[in-house]
Image (cartoon, helix red, strand yellow):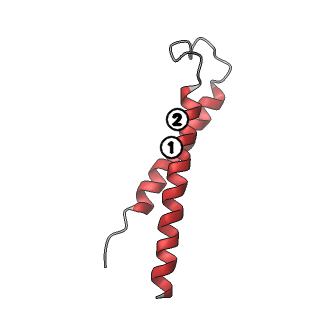
Amino acid sequence: MGVDIRFPIGLMFTIFGLVLTILGLVTNSNAEMYKRSLDININLWSGLVILVFGILMLFFALRARKTRKSN
């Protein structure tokens, strides 16, 4: 019986991605905040990437759990 670390990592990245994405959406109209990053909403884009990674990790963890139960 091995420890599957994909679920807690996926959960952590999903929550962190959601927080960053929401922060990026809330501060989207603040142009002064994003001048240093060449007017790119870095909170929104990095939040979306982290969110996708977290969801993928959760998907793979749940898929592995289903295959273990069926065997």
Residue at 51 percent across and 47 percent down: it is: 15
Amino acid at circle 2: Ser
Q: Name the residue furthest bottom.
A: 71
Relative to 5, residue 71 above or below: below
What SS does tag 2 mark? helix
Dot 1: element: helix
Q: Which numbered dot is residue 46?
A: 2
Residue 61: image x %, image y %?
47, 66
Quadrant containing the N terminus is bottom left
- Residue 21 percent coordinates (x, y): 59, 37
Where does the image place residue 18, in percent across and percent down from the top left? 57, 43
Q: Is residue 2 left or right of residue 36?
A: left
Q: Which residue is mark 1?
A: 50
Up-down relation of residue 42 to residue 32 (above or below): below
Note whether 41 is above or below 31 in the view shown: below
In this rendered view, identify the residue nearer to me: 46 or 13: 46
